Image (spheres, coloured by chain):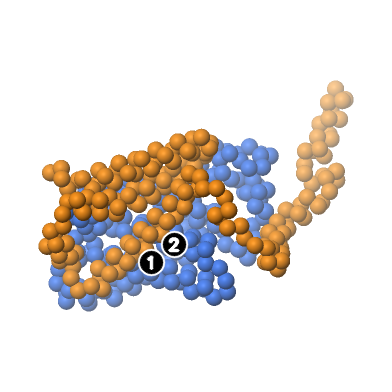
Chain colours: A orange, B blue
Amino acid sequence: MSLSKLRMAIRPCLTVQRSALIPKRVVSSEVKAHEEMRAFWEKNQKLGRPLTHFTTYKMHQPMLMSLGHRITGIAMGVAFYGLVIGLYVMPGDFTHYLDLIKSFDLPKWFLFPAKMVVAFPLMFHYMNGIRHLSWDAGKGVRLATMYKTGWSILATAIVMSACMASLAYLG
Amino acid sequence: MDRSVVTPWAPVTLTLAAVNMATLTRLRSSLAGNCVLSRALGNALLSRATPVAGVIVPHKALSLTPVAHKRIYGPPDPGMPVHTSHWKNERILDIFMAPLIPATVIFPNPVFDMALSTLLCLHINWGLEGVVTDYVHGEMLPKIAHPAVLVMSIAAFACLCMFNYTDVGVGQAIRSLYSL
């Protein structure tokens, strides 16, 4: 009885972080985290330490997928902005330019791959984006799973862009 | 459509688009982060489980409590903007955009067109801004690149609005191009 009372009495001392047993250094280092981070980068800059170029590392699939996600994102973003602003600045409207393309009477062997090349970045970015969302939710982050989903995304993106390109020949 | 009818409306659309984009971009962390709807959506869609106290790096990184956040990243710096709510808003936007892209192409209509245009411009704007933050360094260059991205986003959004109001619209445009 008395022993359990003693335990209950000293429990707060052992569990509360800011008891006399724990030095105050722990708290102050927490406060300094940002300053330390800043000092680290400043020191690196002052010493002129070289940055490791990404070509130092061996190419692997997740790295290329990540790189591809960025590149397709930037390319599509810039191309989309350019197209939209260009269409406003140029004198004709959309139908005018569509008729212009139609008047060229481009052959199918050119149109099909051209459409695929345009559709592939979107499909790839779309699918990989969904994978990123699932990673953010904490799913599929194991390395083996990552490789599997990576290859399946590449394959599905190719198939889906081919489907998009062949839509014109269905009806 | 006749251009001469459209032109008087261009400054109005441009101004509206500029205000819209600027507001959404500048206030994303302060205002949007504290928005009740955004919070509720974020909690409903993204958070997985309550983190266990004492874990250094929780498995579910989305559900960082303030205490866990402080333990990993240090206390919030008063001089620095808080980016976690912005990060969350980007994910919410992506979740909405994922079904909207096929929906707009399959069922093109003005509502889907405008919704997709807005989300797409915001997505590209945040994406390019992230790229600029990552790769553009130095004294002067970031000061030019960041506003440049914002200006381009505003211009593109304005042009896209004009395209949706006066031309065939995004969904129909993609359909026409792919039925060539």
Q: Please, what secondary structure does the residue beneath circle 1 have?
A: helix
Q: Residue at x 78, y 50 (%)?
A: A26
Which amino acid lies under the numbered mark 1 shown in the image of this protein?
A: Ser
Question: Closest to the observer: A111 or A46?
Answer: A111
Mark 2 is surrounded, within 10 Å at the Cα level, by few (under 14), some (14 to 19) or many (20 or more) other residues, namely: many
The answer to whether residue B162 shows anywhere in this view is yes
Residue denoted by label 1: B153
- Above or below residue A152? Residue B1 is below
Chain for mark 1? B
Q: Which image quarter holds the N terminus of chain A?
A: top right
Spatial CA distance of label 1 from label 2 is 10 Å
Q: Which of B48 and A128 is in front in this view?
A: A128
Mark in front: 1 vs 2: 2
Q: Locate residue B94, reporting x and y percent.
A: 40, 50
Q: Which mark is residue B27?
A: none
Q: Position of residue A37 (x, y in %)?
A: 68, 59
Q: Is residue A134 above or below residue A55?
A: above
Query: Residue flagged by tag 2: what amino acid is it?
Result: Leu
Q: Which residue is drawn at 48% across and 74% down?
A: B144
On whether disc 1 and disc 2 are found on a single subunit, the reply is yes
Which residue sits furthest top? A1
Q: Which residue lies under the disc numbered 2? A: B128
Q: Local crowd at mark 1 within 10 Å, few (<14), some, or many (≥20)? A: many
Q: In which quarter of the image is residue A100?
A: bottom left
Q: Where is residue A55 in the image (x, y as percent from the top left)?
A: 54, 54
